[in-house]
Image (cartoon, grey):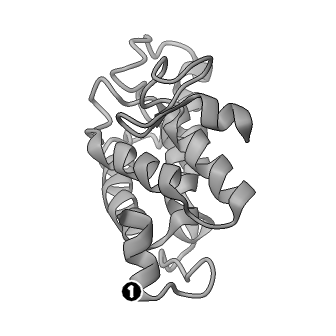
Amino acid sequence: MKNMDRVFNPKDGSFGYRKAGDRNYSLTGVGVLSKLFWLGRPDKTVRQGIKNIESKDLKYSGADCILYSWYYNTQACFQAQGGAWDWWNSRFQDQLTSNQSEDGSWPPPAARKLAATTPASRATPPSIGLSCAPSCWRSSTGTCPPARRPRSAAESRAVRD
C-alpha cells in the first residue's frame, strides 16, 4: 500500500504509475479498487479517486475512452457502491449498449485510433466491455441485486464526500 500512497495525487484524486500524476485517469480505478480491497472500506484517497473518475467525460467516442481503465473504474465504483455505483452504472451501460455494432461487436473507441480490420481488433472492445458488465447485465432479467448489504445513507454519502 505504500506504493499506492506514493503514486496518489491529492491535487486531483488520480493514481499514477511510476509517480503521482503521470497517468491521471487511466489508473485511478486500479488505485481505488486496490485501496478498497486492502482497507475493506473507503478512505480519503478512495473518495478523492471516485470524484476523479466522476469528473471525466464518459463517452465511448471521447478521447478519455480507454476500456482498460473503464474495466477498473467499473469494478471500483461497483465495490464502492452507493452514489459512485449509481453514477457509473447509468452512464456506462448507456455508452456500452449504444455503441454496439449490429453484428454484436464494438468498433475501437476513439482513444485507440486503431483500424478495425482484424477479428482481434474488433473482439477486444467487447471482451473488455462485457467483462466490465456485472453478470446481472448479461442475464435475461437485466437487473442487478445488491453486491452486499445495502449501505446506509450516511455510508453512501461517506463514499461520495
The residue at the point 37 percent across, 64 percent down is 160
Judge whether 60 appears above or below 49 on screen.
above
Percent position (x, y) of residue 121? 55, 20
Against 62, is 105 above or below? below
Q: Where does the N terminus fall, quadrant-wise?
A: top right
- The structure residue drawn at horizontal position 74% and vertical position 55%, both measured from the top left corner, is 38
Q: Which of these two is toward me, 139 or 38?
A: 38
Q: Which amino acid does label 1 sit on?
A: Ala
Q: Where is residue 131 in the image (x, y as percent from the top left)?
A: 62, 49
Give the residue drawn at x 48%, y 37%. 105
Q: Position of residue 9 (x, y in %)?
A: 46, 32
Q: In this view, does 74 lie to the left or right of 95?
A: right
| 142 sits to left or right of 136 | left
Viewer-side residue, 139 vs 154: 154
Left or right: where 128 falls relative to 63: right
Q: Position of residue 103 (x, y in %)?
A: 44, 40
Q: Which residue lies under the disc numbered 1?
A: 153
The one of 6 and 147 positioned closer to us in this rendering: 6
